[in-house]
Amino acid sequence: MVALAGITFASQAVGSDYHNDHTMPGTESQQVADMFQGRESVDTIQVVAEGDLAKFPAVLDKLRGLPHVATVGEPQAGDGIAFATVALDAKGVPVEDVRRVIDTAQSTDLRVELGGELVRGAEETAGGGAEGAGMLAALVILVLMFGSLLAAGLPLITAVFAVGTTVGIIILASHLVDLPDYAPPVMILVGLGVGVDYALLIFARYRSELLAGRDRDTAATRALDTAGRSVLFAGATVIIALLGLLALGLGSLQGLALAVTLTVLLTLVASLTLLPALLSLLGKRIEKAVRRRAHKPHGDRWRAWAAGIQRRPWPALVLAVAALAALSLPALGMRLGFADAGTEASSSTSRQAYDLLAKGFGPGFNGPLVVVARGEQQPGLPQVLADTPGVAKVLPPQQTPNGTVVMLYPTSAPQDEATHDLVTRLRTDVLPTLSGSTFLVGGATAAADDYAEAVSDRLPLFVLVVVGLSALLLMVVFRSILIPLKAAVLNLLSIGAAMGVVTLVFGDGLFGVQSGPVEAFVPVLIFAIVFGLSMDYEVFLLSRMHEEWRRTGDAAHAVREGMAGTGGVITAAAAIMIVVFGAFLFSPDRMLQQFGLGLAVAVLLDAVVIRCLIVPAVMRLFGSAAWWLPRPLVRRLPRVALEHA
């Protein structure tokens, strides 16, 4: 608690210094961006008007003299639409001053909307509350599970401590390393889910030991020596997956990976240190609450469910795998990119400004492309570009020290598939026909394409390394060949199904959601986190099965008792994660919405389809072979026990 107070005080005194770094060194779009680096040292806001445009200058006059407003540009008129650019006097202007500009620009004489990254950020900051809603829902689930507000509060206290400490550390660290401004909500999202999950698994084992007749000290010791080991292993798997993101070399994603890794690490520390301390302080009162519910049946329904699956394993297995495979299919058509104001809520001023600019100046006005020619003069370049299908307008070329620069506007919006096709056409078909120069294509759509291509190129190796290391750890722990193979395949299936749902909702516009690309780094993050979380449930369930297998030697009995001992806890833990992650669907940030949906769906499928249907069916079909390991490996692999009988 002293650490939390000290870090919080220091972070509030220093403040944050977040920086979004989506650079991709070596790509065409990045080379173009580097040429113009430093030319725009301040942030800008676009003020867009529709209606009686003669009154627009009066609106702009109101903005002059506001805090941080440096200059207000002259209005530019289109088809019934006009806009002006407001330049601020610095980067990182406080949100309050941005909102003051938004409020001051409003007029009763004509329609005025404002756009730009600062405006989008101010609107997103004005939303929120997802964390609180998720925590409240988690508390309700825990109270229903344990029947005591005190017992339900322990996992939440542990999670809040870990998350609060991590946020303070990350605020301080933002002055030393590049961390994106979306790091805190992602950290809170993961930290709350993982923190409650880990603490719940340990506390649930503590409760079961009390119900078995053991005293408080013995129950706490056995809970840490069993569930604590499982949590430690599962957390290590998440950390390995997250650290693997560093090898991708994807700008801000590296800083985000470090931030989330630190979050998981501190939740582990809190679950293994703070939670036992709380159990020691409050153990007597908790024991009374636990023993009041001792008469209730424990695990009978899960035992019966497992027995039913064991009687007919093939139908359950085929049906579940087919469902996951069907949900995974849309992910094959996933289009990666970066969201812009065109994917914001239709009620937001940034989205309405975007739509007005598209109405007055054409859809491509919101995402111009830049072509740079290095080498010989290319007097015919503007005409070649103008004759290219998909190009609406080409501006006069400009001669710069870096070469000839030509800006063009597509006929389609930045997020449109046609704009992506235009970038590809320019790079592969149009510009290579011109000799004597080297050509580069940049702009927002080109940068998104380059980033998505980099993710796609590096993802297979990342997946292979994470899956391979996790499978190796499972092999060492459970002394088995089949179990790690099963875990790897099932985890990939659940992640694929989750990404399929994300594609359906955000890519195809299911349920009326604005369609557009999936944020380029969301699939990578979801894979890293979900793979680790899936291992969490895998280890917790299989540890109990392994414990019974070593005690009885009966594979079928081990499956039933493993389900009986962990089914309720895994379901409760999954329900908490689902409500915490799902609460971020109400965030105004589209990236957080995608992230929350992907994690919530993955956990739901893992807990319901995989743990309740596939695992008992597969373990029944494996029989005793599930715990088989070739003799050469038996001698060479170290022995690491998670569960002690």
Image: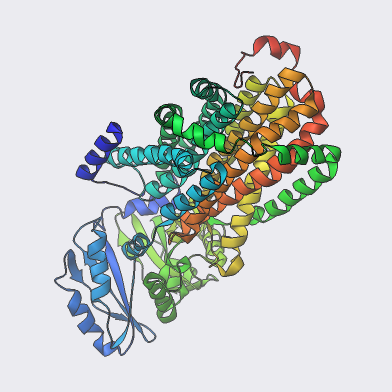
Image quadrant where one finds the C terminus: top right
Image quadrant where one finds the N terminus: top left
From the viewer's perspective, tell me whether residue 579 is left or right of residue 171.
right
- Which residue reaches farthest top? 635
Chosen colour scheme: rainbow
Task: Provide residue 570's location: percent of width, then percent of height.
Answer: 61, 39
Depth check, front residue: 80 or 471: 471
From the viewer's perspective, tell me whether residue 519 is left or right of residue 187.
right
Task: Provide residue 143's location: percent of width, then percent of height.
Answer: 51, 46
- Which residue reaches farthest left? 65
Q: Residue at x 39, y 85 (%)?
A: 79
Task: Provide residue 120's location: percent of width, then percent of height.
Answer: 36, 64
The correct choice, above or below, for 435 with respect to 265 in the image is below
From the viewer's perspective, tell me whether residue 279 is left or right of residue 484.
left
Q: Residue at x 60, y 67 (%)?
A: 511
Depth check, front residue: 448 or 114: 114
**Image label count:** 0
Snapshot quadrant of residue 463:
top right
Q: Is residue 169 visible?
A: yes
Q: Is residue 334 visible?
A: no
The correct choice, above or below, for 100 with respect to 289 in the image is below
